[in-house]
């Protein structure tokens, strides 16, 4: 499935998503194009920044080194979300997400599903 979107700042975003696990084959890519530069997150673990000027910058976890930045729960986003949840509950830190944010996320999902149903 390929989904395209436009950001509030007129950036272009493309999502290319497959239905096969990434351990079997390449299955996803997210690209964000702005004014003169872009960022690509490829198969969840490789991030490429292409600035308007200069060479691209590439980052990928080094899975053989057991530090937080290289662990799957961190690269998949679960660890930071759980750490934030703990800080909200235990320390009273203001929650970075609210019901309005959740509603916006569900609206995007509904729009994508409706578009898929129309094109099927």
Image (cartoon, grey):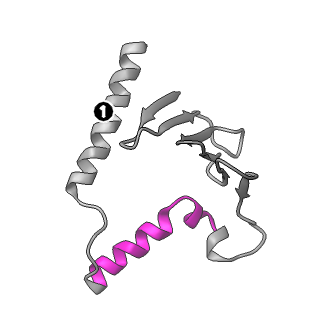
Crowd around label 1: few <14 · some 14–19 · many ≥20 (10 Å)? few
Quarter assignment of residue 116? top left
Question: In front: 105, or 24?
Answer: 105
Q: Is residue 52 above or below residue 25?
A: below
The residue pinned by badge 1 equals 110
Residue at (67, 68) in percent of width and height: 70
Quadrant where the C terminus sits is top left
Pinpoint residue 81: horizontal percent, then vertical percent. 42, 67
The single residue placed furthest to the front in the displayed view is: 53
The stretch of residues the image draws in magenta is 71-90
Find numbered disc 1 in the image and state the secondary structure of the residue it sits on. Answer: helix
Determine if the magenta segment contains residue 79. Answer: yes
Pinpoint residue 1: horizontal percent, then vertical percent. 53, 27
Residue at (71, 59) in percent of width and height: 60
Q: Is residue 41 left or right of residue 103?
A: right
The single residue placed furthest to the bottom in the displayed view is: 91
Question: In front: 83, or 8?
Answer: 8
Magenta span dominant secondary structure: helix
């Amino acid at each position: 499935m390929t989904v395209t979107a436009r950001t509030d700042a007129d950036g272009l975003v493309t999502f290319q998503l497959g239905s096969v696990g990434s351990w079997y084959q390449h299955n996803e890519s997210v690209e964000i194009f702005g004014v003169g530069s872009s960022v690509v997150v490829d198969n969840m673990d490789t991030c490429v920044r292409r600035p308007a000027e200069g060479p691209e910058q590439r980052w990928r976890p080094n899975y053989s080194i057991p530090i937080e930045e290289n662990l799957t729960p961190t690269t998949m986003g679960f660890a930071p979300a759980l750490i934030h949840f703990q800080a909200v509950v235990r320390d009273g830190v203001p929650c970075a997400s609210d019901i309005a944010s959740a509603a916006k996320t569900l609206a995007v999902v509904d729009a994508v599903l409706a578009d898929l149903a129309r094109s099927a």
